[in-house]
Amino acid sequence: MTDVNDKKFGLSRLPNRRKFLQYAGLSTAYFLNGSKNCHEYDQKGKAGPPKVSDWELQFHDGFEKEKLNSKLWNIGFGWGRTTKSSPTVIRTNNVKLLENKLNLQIKLNNGRPTAGAVNTRNKATFGPGSYFEAKLKMPDQVGILPAFWAIPNDGAWPPEIDVVELFQNNGSYRDALTSQHTLHYSSSTKPGDEDTHRKITRSYKSDSDLTDSFHVYGCLWTGYKVIHYVDGVPAAEFTDPTVMKALRRGGLFYLLLTIDVIDTVPADPVEFSKEAMTADWVRVWQNAEEEVELKERNC
């Protein structure tokens, strides 16, 4: 999910990812307190990082409150509530908590599509040595793009990690079987260098329709590799040194869950309003042994 540079924020870059709890102003105990699902990470191998015993759960939201937890989430993209790549406008009333799940909805407002989106900018940020995952049910509608992704907290784009996106451009069953996993980066490795923007994408063909039920989408990010997972199965792996250096130099990232109307694909104005992206939970794990000091980002 691109088009981050609506955006230059000028926030100072943080010296290393160990400060993310301080930066969020919250303790690990706060993140995990009262989350009855936070240790249900096994789920027949479909959730949690590889060798889960080596990792510590640092962030969890099971959306069990009546309202969105404002200590963990903002509404919007992080840089605002509109984007150049789409006519969609983010509205607060399109973000609903229903039956212990987060619903990001699509609606029409005077003919213009509105949508729900949430992010953790300035509240919870993460770097190499992280595994982030979400249990999601994707919408089944041509012209709608759901995404789970991460971008630098200071607004310098690229880089970007797209944990998962689901494009349905022609309404075929094949579209609902195929998830996309993408990294955006600058070939110069300099954060915010849009002139050298590149992206690398891998597609994953699932055995089942990804819009029929919930699936777990995860991303392992170390200093030297990024591996995407769908239901615990490796879906894409990236190790290119230039890409990895560009990600490291991006500093700390924040998470986004968004649903958008693709402006190049006209969605049915009636049918698309019936769909939503639903999140059962979102988690971030950390592994001290995998942690990489971010000195190289300033090289």
Image: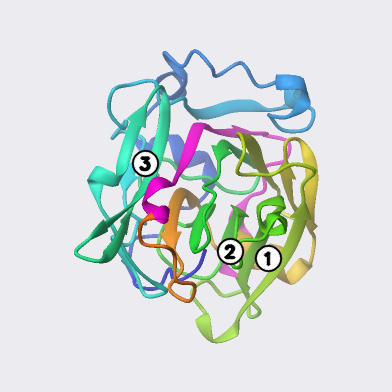
Instruction: Return the residue at label 3.
Output: 123
Answer whether labels 1 and 2 touch (C-beta < 8 Å): yes
Residue 297 in the magenta stretch? The answer is yes
The segment highlighted magenta reads 271-299
Kindly report which numbered mark, 2 or 3, lies closer to the viewer in this rendering.
3
Answer whether labels 2 and 3 touch (C-beta < 8 Å): no
| Image side of residue 45 versus residue 37, left or right | right
Residue 22 in the magenta stretch? The answer is no
* Distance of label 1 from label 2 (alpha carbons): 6 Å
Q: Is residue 210 above or below residue 251?
A: above
Residue kind at label 3, given as amino acid type: Lys
Note whether residue 200 is visible: yes
Tell me which numbered mark, 2 or 3, is placed earlier along the sequence: 3
Tell me which numbered mark, 1 or 3, is placed earlier along the sequence: 3
Who's the residue at 56% across and 75% down the image?
190
Query: Where is residue 39, by image quadrant?
Result: top right
Residue kind at label 2, given as amino acid type: Arg
Residue 249's disc is 2
Who's the residue at 51% across and 59% down the image?
145
Between 85 and 3, the residue placed more toward the observer is 85
* Distance of label 1 from label 3 (alpha carbons): 25 Å
Instruction: Return the residue at label 1.
Output: 245
Expressed as whole percent of the image width and height from the top left, the position of residue 235 reads 78, 50
Which coloring applies here? Answer: rainbow
Q: Secondary structure at mark 2?
A: helix
Expressed as whole percent of the image width and height from the top left, the position of residue 185 reads 61, 71
Q: Is residue 248 above or below residue 208?
A: below
| Image side of residue 89 versus residue 222, left or right | left
Q: Residues within 10 Å of mark 3 (few under 14, many from 20)?
A: many
Query: Where is residue 110, by image quadrant?
Result: bottom left
* Distance of label 2 from label 3 (alpha carbons): 20 Å
